[in-house]
C-alpha cells in the first residue's frame, strides 16, 4: 500500500547514549535475522548535492532489487530509481493523475481515480524485472463501485487486489479481480476515522491494518480486516488502547507492525494473510525516557526499528526472529527530529533533518515575520565498526509553513538521499540529490 504522506519538520533534540540493549527487560534477546541479499559491500563517496528536476509524490517500495518512487519530471509521469552509476533515472509511465501504487513481486501497479463525472478509475502495471528497462503494460479501466474512488490504500496480488476508497469518515473497502478489474462483491463500509497503516495481498486474499476511531471514541483502536477471494471478511482487534504513531514493514512472508500507546512502544508480527503470529511485544520497557518518535526502516528483507527518545537522539536495532529487537545502537550525529533510512547488506543509510523556528527581523511595517531554517545530514552506520561522519546535505530557509520531504533510495551496495522542498521552502525550488554510498571498487 502506497499513498503520499507529507512529513512535517519540527525542533531538533540532543544526542542519546550509545550501545545499550534495546530492551533489557526482555529475556533471551535473539540474534537478528540474516540478510539474504547478495552481499555487495558499499563504500563512502565524495558527492556534492545536485539539483534534480523531479517532484516525487510517493514511495513505492522495493522491486527488481531497487527502491522506486513515483512522481513527475519535465511534465511527465515517471518512475524513479537509483542507477548503478549513482544517478537518478526516470522512466515515463502511460498513466496520469496517479494517486496510489503497490508492488507485487517484480511488478509495480499504479492507480488513478476517475477524474471527470462518470469517469472510471484506471490502473496499469510496470514490469521492473530489469530495473534499467521497465516494461509498461496497458492502461485498464476499473469497476470500483464505491461512492468515491479516491484511494487511501492499495495492495495487489496475483488474483486479487484491495482498494480502500473514499474520505476519512466515509471510506469503503473494495476487493478487485486482478485479471478483469471488476469488484468482487459490493463495497464494504468502514468505521469512522479509518486510517490504513498497511494493505497487503497474497495471491487471492488480502488484508488491511488500520487505526479506527482514534480520536477518543469507544471503538477498538488498531484492527486488521482480512478479505478472502470470494469477498468474505473477518475483522480482528490488534490493540484497544489509544494508538499514537504506527508503521509497518513487510519482510518475506511477514508484516511487522510498530505502534505507540499509553504504555509505550510495541511490536507485533502478522502473516501475509493478516493473521497475528504471537502477542504484541513491548520494547524499551525498562527505559525511564519515553519514545518521542519511532519508525520501521526496511529494504531488501531487512527491518530495523528506529526510536527517538525524549531528551535523547536516534538509535536503531535490527528486528530479529519473533519480532525481538537486537542490540540497540546510537546513530552518531542524528540528533534532529526527522529520520528516514534504509538498510543495505552492510549497514544503514540514513537522512536526518529538522526545522528550527526563529523570529525574523522587523520588515519595516511593524510586524515581526516568522522564518524557519532546515538543516539536513546524511550518514551510514555499518553493521560492524565505527560510523562515518555525517554528510552535510545543506541548509535551507523556509518562510511560514515550509519544510522538506526526505527519501532514501537504494540498490545493492548503493544509497542516495533525495530532499524535496514543500510549502514555503523559499531557498530551494527544486529537489536536491546526493549519493551516500556506492559499491566498493574491486
Image (tube, helix red, strand yellow):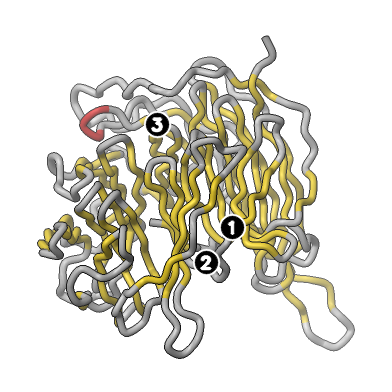
Q: Position of residue 152 (x, y in %)?
A: 38, 68
Which residue corresponds to the image point at 17% horizontal and 72% vertical from the top-left?
A: 185
Q: CA distance from mark 2 to mark 3?
A: 29 Å
Question: Residue under circle 3?
Answer: 302
Q: Position of residue 167 (x, y in %)?
A: 37, 79
**Where, by quadrant of the figure, is residue 426 drawn?**
bottom right
Question: Please, is residue 18 above or below residue 149 in the view?
Answer: above
Q: Which mark is residue 412?
A: none
Describe residue 71's horizontal placement relative to residue 125 as left or right: right
Question: Please, is residue 27 above or below residue 173 in the view?
Answer: above
Q: Residue furthest right?
A: 364
Question: Residue under circle 1?
Answer: 93
Q: Secondary structure at mark 2?
A: loop
Q: Residues within 10 Å of mark 3 (few under 14, many from 20)?
A: many
**Where, by quadrant of the figure, is residue 431 drawn?**
bottom right
Q: Residues within 10 Å of mark 1 (few under 14, many from 20)?
A: many
Question: Residue under circle 2?
Answer: 98
Using the image as rendered, state which of residue 92 and residue 366 is in the foreground: 92
Which residue corresponds to the image point at 47% horizontal and 40% vertical from the top-left?
A: 63
Which residue corresponds to the image point at 25% horizontal and 70% vertical from the top-left?
A: 183
Amino acid at each position: 500500500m502506497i499513498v503520499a504522506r507529507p512529513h512535517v519538520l519540527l525542533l531538533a533534540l540532543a544526542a542519546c547514549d550509545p550501545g545499550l540493549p534495546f530492551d533489557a527487560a526482555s529475556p533471551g534477546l535473539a540474534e537478528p535475522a540474516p540478510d539474504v541479499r547478495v552481499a555487495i559491500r558499499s563504500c563512502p563517496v565524495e558527492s556534492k548535492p545536485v539539483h534534480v528536476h523531479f517532484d516525487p509524490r510517493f514511495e513505492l517500495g522495493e522491486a527488481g532489487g531497487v527502491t522506486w518512487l513515483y512522481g513527475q519530471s519535465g511534465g511527465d509521469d515517471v518512475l524513479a530509481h537509483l542507477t548503478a552509476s549513482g544517478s537518478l533515472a526516470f522512466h515515463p509511465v502511460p498513466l496520469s493523475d496517479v494517486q496510489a501504487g503497490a508492488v507485487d513481486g517484480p511488478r509495480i501497479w499504479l492507480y488513478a481515480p476517475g477524474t471527470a463525472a462518470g469517469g472510471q478509475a484506471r490502473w496499469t502495471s510496470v514490469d521492473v524485472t530489469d530495473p534499467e528497462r521497465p516494461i509498461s503494460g496497458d492502461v485498464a479501466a476499473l469497476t470500483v463501485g464505491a461512492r468515491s474512488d479516491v484511494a487511501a490504500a492499495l495492495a495487489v496480488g496475483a488474483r486479487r487486489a484491495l482498494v480502500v476508497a473514499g474520505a476519512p469518515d466515509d471510506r469503503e473497502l473494495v476487493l478487485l479481480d486482478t485479471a478483469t478489474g471488476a469488484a468482487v462483491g459490493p463495497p464494504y463500509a468502514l468505521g469512522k476515522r479509518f486510517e490504513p497503516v498497511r494493505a497487503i495481498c497474497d495471491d487471492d486474499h488480502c488484508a488491511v491494518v488500520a487505526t479506527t476511531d482514534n480520536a477518543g471514541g469507544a471503538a477498538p483502536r488498531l484492527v486488521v480486516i482480512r478479505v478472502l477471494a470470494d469477498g468474505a471478511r473477518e475483522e480482528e482487534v490488534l490493540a484497544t488502547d489509544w494508538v499514537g504513531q504506527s508503521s509497518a514493514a513487510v519482510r518475506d512472508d511477514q508484516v511487522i507492525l510498530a505502534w505507540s500507546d499509553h504504555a509505550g512502544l510495541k511490536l507485533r508480527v502478522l502473516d501475509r494473510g493478516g493473521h497475528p503470529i504471537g502477542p504484541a511485544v513491548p520494547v524499551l520497557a525498562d527505559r525511564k525516557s519515553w519514545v518521542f518518535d519511532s519508525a520501521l526502516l526496511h529494504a531488501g528483507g531487512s527491518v530495523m526499528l528506529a526510536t527517538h527518545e525524549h531528551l535523547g537522539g536516534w538509535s536503531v536495532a535490527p528486528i530479529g526472529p519473533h519480532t525481538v529487537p537486537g542490540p540497540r545502537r546510537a546513530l552518531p550525529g542524528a540528533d534532529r527530529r526527522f529520520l528516514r533510512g534504509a538498510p543495505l547488506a552492510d549497514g544503514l543509510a540514513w537522512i536526518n533533518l529538522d526545522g528550527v523556528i526563529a523570529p525574523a527581523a522587523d520588515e519595516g511595517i511593524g510586524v515581526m515575520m516568522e522564518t524557519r531554517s532546515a538543516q539536513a545530514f546524511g550518514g551510514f552506520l555499518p553493521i560492524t565498526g565505527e560510523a562515518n561522519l555525517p554528510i552535510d546535505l545543506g541548509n535551507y530557509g523556509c518562510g511560514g509553513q515550509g519544510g522538506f520531504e526526505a527519501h532514501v533510495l537504494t540498490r545493492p551496495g548503493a544509497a542516495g538521499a533525495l530532499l524535496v522542498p514543500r510549502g514555503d521552502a523559499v531557498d530551494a525550488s527544486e529537489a536536491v540529490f546526493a549519493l551516500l554510498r556506492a559499491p566498493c571498487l574491486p
